[in-house]
Image (cartoon, rainbow, N blue to C red):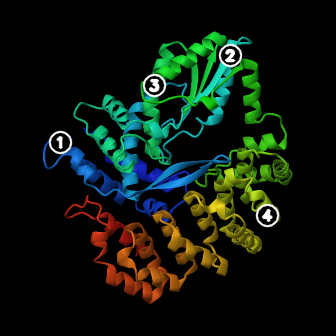
Amino acid sequence: MSDVTLDHFKRATADIGANGDNDTLPFDIDVRFINENQERLAELAYRYFEYLDGLPKKDTKPLNVRDTINSLDVFSERLLVPTGAAGFRITTKIHPLWNIYLNGLGVAIAEVHEPMRSDRVHSYRFLSQGNKLFDWTSSWRAFREASIADCEAVGDRAVVVQTDISSFYEHVYHHRIENCIDDLFSEGSKVAIQVDRFLSKLASGRSFGLPVGGQCSRILAELLLSSVDQRLTEEGIRWRRYVDDFVLVTNNQADAYRALAFLSHALADYGLSLNRTKTTVLTGKHFCDYVRTQLGGAGDDSSKLREIDLHFDPYSDSCLDDYEALRETVESLEVRALLDLELNKGQPDTFLVAQIGRTLRYHSPGVALQLCGTLLSPKNLHAFRASWTTIMRGISTVRKDDAFTDIFDGIDMLLDAIPEHSPHLLLAEASCLHFLRAIRFRRTDTRGQYVSRLYSSTPSQSVKRACIDCWRQWKDRPSFIRIRNNWSSINPEEQRMLWLAGKDFGDDGKNFRAQEKRSTVNYWRLGIEQDGFPTFADIYKKWCA
């Protein structure tokens, strides 16, 4: 039996359809496309896996797994994402079919690997069933609470080390990942070499780095660090881990130093190193007090807001009761007063501001508008920049909800002012994408000018797609015709968005599709097409129809 089955790709498509393709970016229309074509896309990915699985690994010319994948044109794009008050990182947007493919391989890996993992790891615990790949109850909070319990078990003499890995995802060596995967599967398995080659494609030929934002990378990161986890356990060190955050609980200062040295050696074997600026050694009491403050336990509004789980599952049996209970809890808090307190701080609490952004839809329209006004004020927005993503997501959620119709004009005025007073906050592509999603509900002259200039100036295909999506939502015919006339010179990713937009422009769109229907066969070719089976282009065009 093959290491990878059709069910693995079905899990991958279900997860993307339900939860998105990249957690740092807004939902792209491709997420809806995947959600509504799960079976066909999973079958397409699996057929290609079967083809590759039947080839030799390498050294057999001209057909082998390595060279076949190397010959593919795998679309991906590196996008800048703000992190913290002054930092940035890179996330990767991947073509929808290749994202499904990688995640399908990831599901197969996680299925085998999960029973081998230590219960001291709290990040991305794989679920064997459902449209969610990971157990949400195994969370960062659970990690911190378990660390407190370990500390209390040692007693008053406890000394705690907190540390994390420096630029973890960027420094993961692909060959190490390949070896770890090979250890999981049978000798003839092609999974490891496939993952290695696709990672190399996404890293522009480099032999290191995991693409940030997708599920497969999380699975691969956990697989690699399991070897380090094992060594810590064998050494008798009391430890906890969440992704690349480690907590080591020891009996004294000397043991703390020895444990930290051991962890450094273990990571060095994999080309990784600790972040010196984030490494701290605390007494057990100070650590517990710090974490309890971090988690919120004082019983005030700030603590209650931190503790709220803002995930609302509409498919739950008690979804209406859950929603009402959550709304009542939020309405009972003095959120406006909390936000005012954050404004008076030199460095606002990023998580608390983000949590306020998440609560917008649970307030009355009047309160929601007041909060939006504070969050988007020219004098405040820069201070809240670390929470930009969550703020924009919260505003987008309110802006598309008819229950808030009375405040749409007010929100739109606040949004239209941002490119004028805070253009620097739109420089990162991820921030720009979140902003475009918030303004796509209605065209104004200000927005029309901004999107037109942006489309002409940005090199990012993802941003250009989002611009076209705005024109689609606004039914901006002049912009549609302008881009339609440049069909042959635009990127296939833009072409797919323009093709979707065609249905919103009557005869102009219909005639455009009829004229260019044959050209899509070549423009959207992935290199995996098989005679007698629907192609990715076929599935996409049928969905658009």
Q: Circle 2 is placed at which residue position? A: 159
Q: Residue drawn 60% across and 72% down?
A: 440
Other residues around mark 4 within 10 Å, as few (<14) / some (14–19) / many (≥20) = some
Q: Residue drawn 40% across and 62% down?
A: 37
140 with respect to 494 (left or right): right
Tag nearer the camera, 1 or 3? 3
| Numbered mark located on residue 512 in the image | none
- Compute the Cα span from label 4 to label 3: 48 Å
Name the residue type under label 1. Answer: Pro
- Compute the Cα span from label 1 to label 3: 33 Å
15 with respect to 437 (left or right): left
| Numbered mark located on residue 56 in the image | 1
Tag nearer the camera, 1 or 2? 2
Q: Give whichever of discs 4 and 3 has the lower sequence position.
A: 3
Q: Give whichever of discs 3 and 2 has the lower sequence position.
A: 2
Rendered location of residue 269, percent (x, y): 42, 24
Rendered location of residue 386, percent (x, y): 68, 50
- Compute the Cα span from label 1 to label 2: 53 Å
Other residues around mark 1 within 10 Å, as few (<14) / some (14–19) / many (≥20) = some
Q: Circle 4 is placed at which residue position? A: 373
Q: Residue drawn 45% across and 37% down?
A: 171
Other residues around mark 2 within 10 Å, as few (<14) / some (14–19) / many (≥20) = many
Q: Secondary structure at mark 2?
A: strand
Quarter placement of the N terminus: top left
Q: Secondary structure at mark 3?
A: helix
Name the residue type under label 4. Answer: Gly
| Numbered mark located on residue 268 in the image | 3
Rendered location of residue 117, percent (x, y): 46, 27
Q: Give whichever of discs 1 and 3 has the lower sequence position.
A: 1
